[in-house]
Amino acid sequence: QVQLVESGGGLVQPGGSLRLSCAASGFIFSAYTMGWYRLAPGKERELVATITSESSTYYRDSVKGRFTISRDNAKNTVYLQMNSLKPEDTAVYYCTVRCYGMDYWGKGTLVTVSS
């Protein structure tokens, strides 16, 4: 079955960096677009970034120039490098894939940006 397991979250000061990882299994990883969403307290879920099977990328405006999404098909892993973090980046970050006609989500990893 499809499984997505995020890691790499934690507490970081404003201006700091974190790299999130999402280990995928149960599907042909290299063939699918992968995405990162986030959910902050009191806010709606928002799409952060996506990367296609050809490694074309999309970023929401608020993270452009600060976040980088990448993938390693040999390791079935997608990454989200987050630099220059701001308090408003605080959220639970989820990895997602749409395959076999369904959307699959990991359990999420918490990122807290605070001094």
Image: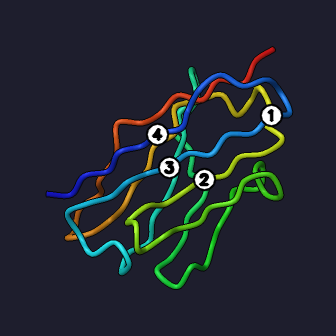
Quadrant for the N terminus in the image: bottom left
Residue at image position (55%, 56%) is 79
Estimate the spatial distance between the alpha carbons at disc 4 and disc 1, rounded to whole Å: 17 Å
Q: Would residue 30 appear left or right of 17 to someone viewing this image? A: left
Mark 2 or mark 4, which has the lower sequence index?
4
The disc at residue 21 is 3
- Identify residue for label 1: 16
Estimate the spatial distance between the alpha carbons at disc 1 and disc 3, rounded to whole Å: 17 Å
Mark 3 or mark 4, which has the lower sequence index?
4
The disc at residue 80 is 2
Mark 4 or mark 1, which has the lower sequence index?
4
Mark 3 or mark 2, which has the lower sequence index?
3
Seen from the viewer's position, the closer of residues 58 and 16 is 16
Residue at image position (55%, 64%) is 50
Amino acid type at circle 2 is: Leu
Residue 14 horizontal/vertical position (percent):
83, 27
Estimate the spatial distance between the alpha carbons at disc 2 and disc 4, rounded to whole Å: 10 Å
Residue 95 horizontal/vertical position (percent):
43, 50
The disc at residue 7 is 4
Classify mark 2: residues with Cα within 10 Å, few (<14), some (14-19) or many (20+): many
Mark 3 near mark 2, Cβ–Cβ under 8 Å?
Answer: no
Mark 3 near mark 4, Cβ–Cβ under 8 Å?
Answer: yes
Q: Is residue 106 above or below residue 40?
A: below
Estimate the spatial distance between the alpha carbons at disc 3 and disc 2, rounded to whole Å: 7 Å
| Residue furthest out toward the top | 115
- The secondary element bearing badge 2 is classed as strand
Quadrant for the C terminus in the image: top right
